[in-house]
Amino acid sequence: MNLPDTSLGAVATDTAGHTELQACAIAARQQCRPQLLLDFIPYSSFIGAQAKISDGIVLYWLEPRRSNIGNPTLPAIHGGVIGGFLELSASIELLYNFGLNTLPKTIDFSLDYLRPGHYQTLYASCRILRKGNQLVNASITAWQIDVDLPVATARCHFLIN
């Protein structure tokens, strides 16, 4: 059985997909709607990722979804979902804020789990620490009730050319 590829790279592997992503990125920036980029990526809808502009920054979040539970005893969000959500958020941040029209390539991704991600809304925000001509260094923080009590933090390096 062939399952659909839900990876980030699945959306722009051909010329048509690349052109569609460019058009989507341009529309998202013009309309101030980063959600348009998330809607374009299959994995985003699979986990239920959402985004909006809040206080001049892009705020990402995951609403509670039974399919995202890893530990049903607590219940807690699966660590892989948290990691995927943070990497996805950083990719969208680059596409939306830096005028990229192709998906950035992940070179390195380091994730620290600090607390259980309980079965409630999970928020994330990104900070670009350095942007060079080819490489970008980003920091992503996920929290639930209090931004000062993060659930997880991640550091990423992306190739953008």
Image (spheres, rainbow, N blue to C red):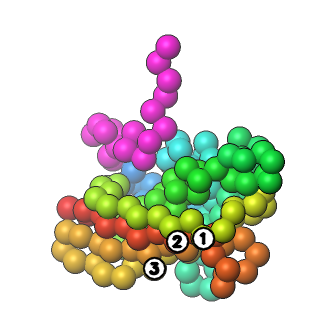
Q: Is residue 145 above or below residue 88?
A: below
Could you tell me the amino acid type at mark 3? Arg
Please identify the quadrant where the C terminus is shown: bottom left
Could you tell me the amino acid type at mark 2? Thr
Q: Are discs 1 and 2 less than 8 Å apart at CB?
A: yes
Residue of label 3: 127
Is 12 magenta? The answer is yes
How far is mark 1 from mark 2, CA to CA? Answer: 8 Å
Q: Secondary structure at mark 2?
A: strand
Instruction: Please provide the residue range marked out in magenta.
Output: 1-20
Q: Secondary structure at mark 3?
A: strand
Q: Position of residue 150 (x, y in %)?
A: 63, 75
Upstream in sequence: badge 3 or badge 1: 1
Whether residue 28 can be seen here:
no
Q: In the depicted view, which residue is nearer to us: 131 or 141?
A: 141
Identify which residue is drawn at 59% across, 53% down: 79
Label annotation for residue 153: 2
